[in-house]
Amino acid sequence: MILRRPVFWLILIFAALMAFIPFHANDVSMREDLILVAIAVILASNLNLMIGYTGYVNFGHIVFYGLGGYVGLYLATVRNWNLVPASLAAGVVVSLFALMLGMGILRLRGAYFALATIGVLLAVQSFVANFDPWGRSTGLYVDFSAYERLGGARHALWMTYFLVIGVMALSMILSLGIKISKFGLGLFAIREDEDAAVVLGVNTTVFKAIIYSVSAFLPAVAGALMFYKNGMIDPSIAFEFMLSLEGIVMLMLGGKGTVVGAALGGGLYEKLRSYLLTSPKLSNFQLVIAGGLLLLVVLFAPGGLIGWLYRLVPRARKVIE
Amino acid sequence: MKRLVLPIFLVVALFVTTGFAQNLTLGFTASNTGAMNVDSLEQKRGFELWRDQVNAAGGIKAGGKSYKVQFVSYDDESNPKRVQQLYSRLILQDKADFLFSPYSSSLTATAAIVTEQYEKIMLTTGAAEGKTYTLGNHYLFQMFTPGAEYLKGVLDMLKTKDPKAAIAFVYEDASFSVSVVNPAKEYAQKLGFNVAFSEAYAPNTTDFSAIIDKVIASKSTILLGGGHYADGSTLAKQLYEHKVQLKMITLLVAPDSDKWTELGDAAVGVIVPSQWEPQSAFKPQYGPSGADFAKAYTAKFNAPPSYESAGGYASGLILQRAIEQAGSTDSAKVAAALNATDITTFYGRSKFATEANQHGLQVGHAMVLAQWQKDKSGKLVKQVVWPLAAKSANLVYPIH
């Protein structure tokens, strides 16, 4: 039972605090910092389903986030849908797209799969850049009046924040739920030895396609919310390869294959980057410092922060999953 | 006791004088890293020169007070993801009174969502896309001529030289260049030109040979397009290496930079639509003359100003005048003064649209065309060739 897991309650408390503290203090700066943290946690947690649980490296994970942004923004601005149904629809559409795609490319393994995911990213980006209803390379813009429908821009941005925090909590709960389920066991079997998993009766193609599709849903919803908040989307910002790579770095930092590790890595990485960026003394060296720290982690703590914690306190495994 | 009188007097005097000079905080982000750092740096230098000159002259004087200008700025990494976080920080933590935009249209559009929310005035420069102004803003003021106007002058000029020319449009598939080229294509067709070829290339393209072959096959004699510095300079270099016999090459943004001379012979003859050139001889009603600005800029940064630099400086100038006119630093009053602005500075005329459906759009400023030519000593120099009233040299046509 998921309810008996301490981590489940920790996730809820963490999300509630993240939602409550900036709202209570009416601190918009803190909210803007935390929303980027939440997005990082969402991307890292869902990427973890593929990389950490199933052992398939997905370099094109950001395609779900970007496509979700496009579908959501299209429905919300051109078709005048409300934000929440538009975001959910974005999640569903992108998940279905991932399912169809997954059935095809997940027959590939290892480096071939990783390469195919880069291909998917580039192909989708080119398609969107030439797709008329989505504004081609100039993208889609949100009319300022669209925020009026949600009670003005200030109110709308708070609402988007709470929704993003909700999606973040769901991402972590989803990770936990899959980890303790039979389906999760099947995924771990694929990760450890795919051929053995087949022999044991795991329908690996279906399992992989399902997890690929599931890992697309929440990032797509988050993309719809985030680009609505940003006010515009165009192919260069929606499908940023760098962000895909950063997602993998976040996982390595926190510890792949664990629920808390993915979230911790996402959160810490984002906090570190924005601290370095705005620090008057360090901002000129921010990329050097971020890069150096990551090298240290990979060299000396290959299991990430959580792996390091497990080695230090083996009993932590039971609480921090 | 007597010995203390003088020091006390000095301290009090210092206190009183500094008490009157208040600080005015201006916030912006600049792309210190990432794809747009060359253009963004030049814009930032424009801001800085203006700040230093204003402060040296005692600050901005409004309503009997004088305000020293101070800047707060962050690196946005040329990435829109950071922009809202950083502009919120500028407004809320750094308490910026007024804002300048980041460099580029997409970063500016993203920043505008935040600045509008807090009813903060943002002068936008380095952002020519017009769409942002049609979304119902109240506090945006655009310094650049909108993108749709960029290539019209080139086509008008070409009409006088070669009314039946075959044109190839080769441009970066990005927000800014597409918003420039699409209206230009329509205008070219309206003028009766033959648009023989049109292709957008992906941002970050480094190999143009396939596109260049298609340009040659289309028998075009004119090439219009480009995007930003990196792709534009590479395209020009490869056109030269492939010995394409074009009569005219016009590229966006890139040839305006001083670094263009590094291309050597590939740079010769290339035209750039420009917001401003040092040779533009506008008679300023306010602020320094073009020559004085260029001289001060070159002395400070050891490089001649580009139009991004001029746009940066002019943003400061227009804001300064509006604050002086309003006699206050109150956002609503300064916005009203900006709405009423119609003035010529060294940068040319500035006037903002006030209709609700396009508030803040620049409607006063006009583009000039500059061409890289060799002077008598064989040195590469940029000459204004259009409009004829502002020209500093005749157009070289055809270049091959």
Image (cartoon, rainbow, N blue to C red):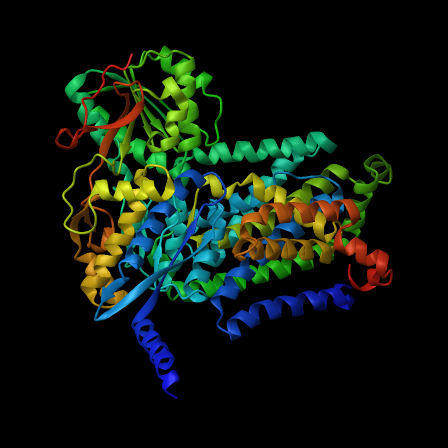
The image quarter in which residue B297 lies: top left
The image quarter in which residue B225 lies: top left
| Residue at image location 23% in from the left, 18% down from the top | B396
**Left or right: where A57 falls relative to A273:** right
B79 in relation to B163, above or below: below
Count of labels shown?
0
* Residue A45 x/y as whole percent: 66, 52
* Residue A111 x/y as whole percent: 71, 31
**Left or right: where B3 falls relative to A191:** left
Where the C terminus of chain B falls, by quadrant?
Answer: top left
Where the N terminus of chain B falls, by quadrant?
Answer: bottom left
**Left or right: where A240 falls relative to B15:** right
Residue A189 is at least partly visible in this image: yes
**Relative to the observer, which residue lies in front, B103 or A259?**
B103
**Left or right: where B143 falls relative to B87:** left
| Residue at image location 24% in from the left, 68% down from the top | B328
